[in-house]
Image (cartoon, grey):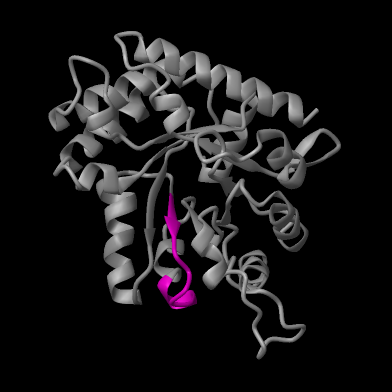
């Protein structure tokens, strides 16, 4: 299956719009693991096993592995997820953005080395920095569009005087991703949960693209407002998918030996809140 087919199947099978972000910080690990970067795989694998039937996707953030020289543990984790949760697509959160020849190498890293089903990208160097990823048919690419950090206003919310209608930059990106850049139907957008009105605006401009929405949980985004702003159906079928990410609230639901069980409880709770919002 393609990434987007996997996404739809996971949504139906697990009755979920929740994505669990895997951002392992050894300083926050439970007792017995705390401060030990060699246990990153063990910690993340336990979270995956505890939540695999509650999610629409997993999203490992590559910096949390690379900072601790744990890329080999990420490789093991990616393989583990394919074994224990083959029905759940994996989005590698890398936010890459570089010239075409370098982007080709990053695409090899994401899709061949790590075996990701999709990757996050920064589109601000233009289409030629995105195109190498689209050569991997069946894979997905999520472009940063309207991010949840306050500094996103510095660029994303500025108007483009040279474009008809003077859209804001994030609006222009949404149009490009829905239209001429989406050559093979592989693109999605990253839109922060802290801006529900702008999620709605992105959805108007990109009615069929999947939206990866971080910021629910520890970052303060409202789950119900997020779903109502971005999730769309037609005849009972999803037409505008949303993938609502929660990382810290799930990963660090407990600092004790019950951390995996606590993560499952929090994942189920968040999943149910999201499910209730889309009814």
Name the residue nearer the viewer: 103 or 67. Answer: 67
Splitting the image into 4 quarters, where does residue 225 fall?
Answer: top right
Observer-nearest of 76 and 163: 163
Q: Is residue 123 magenta?
A: yes
For the point 26% across and 24% down, the residue is 29
x then y, percent, for residue 271: 61, 24
Identified at 23% across, 22% down, the residue is 42
Image quadrant holding the C terminus, namely top right
Farthest residue in the bottom direction? Answer: 162
Closest to the observer, 47 or 238: 47
Horizontal and vertical percent for residue 33?
Answer: 19, 20
Q: Which residues are magenta?
A: 119-129
From the top left corner, tell me how far across and down residue 233 is, in percent: 79, 40
**Residue at the extreme right:** 235
Question: Does residue 175 belong to the magenta stretch?
Answer: no
- Which of the two residues, 143 or 239, is positioned nearer the viewer here? 143
In the rendered image, residue 87, in percent from the top left (x then y), is placed at 48, 27
Left or right: 260, with 54 as reference point = left
Q: How many marks?
A: 0
Taking 241 as reference, is 187 above or below it? below
Picture quadrant of residue 256 = top left
**Going 41% across and 10% down the picture, which residue do you hit?**
261
Residue at point 78% right, 59% down? 204
């Amino acid at each position: 299956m393609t990434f987007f087919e996997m996404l739809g199947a996971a949504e139906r099978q697990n009755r979920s719009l929740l994505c669990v972000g895997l951002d392992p910080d050894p300083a926050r690990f439970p007792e017995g693991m705390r401060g030990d970067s060699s246990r990153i795989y063990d910690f993340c694998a336990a979270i995956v096993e505890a939540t695999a039937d509650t999610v629409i996707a997993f999203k490992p953030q590559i910096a949390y592995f690379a900072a601790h020289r744990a890329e080999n543990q990420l490789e093991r984790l990616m393989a583990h997820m394919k074994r224990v949760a083959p029905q759940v697509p994996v989005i590698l959160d890398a936010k890459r953005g570089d010239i075409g020849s370098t982007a080709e190498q990053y695409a090899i890293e994401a899709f061949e080395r790590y075996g990701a089903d999709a990757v996050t990208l920064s589109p601000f160097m233009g289409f030629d920095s995105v195109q190498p990823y689209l050569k991997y048919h069946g894979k997905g690419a999520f472009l940063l569009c309207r991010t949840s950090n306050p500094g996103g206003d510095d660029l994303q919310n500025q108007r483009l005087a040279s474009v008809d209608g003077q859209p804001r930059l994030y609006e222009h990106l949404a149009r490009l991703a829905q239209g001429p850049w989406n050559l093979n139907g592989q693109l999605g957008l990253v839109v922060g949960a802290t801006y529900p009105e702008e999620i709605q605006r992105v959805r108007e401009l990109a009615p069929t693209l999947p939206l990866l929405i971080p910021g629910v949980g520890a970052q303060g985004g409202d789950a119900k407002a997020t779903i109502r702003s971005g999730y769309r159906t037609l005849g009972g079928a999803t037409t505008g998918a949303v993938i609502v990410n929660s990382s810290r609230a799930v990963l660090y639901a407990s600092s004790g030996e019950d951390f995996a069980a606590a993560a499952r409880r929090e994942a189920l709770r968040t999943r149910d809140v999201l499910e209730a919002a889309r009814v």
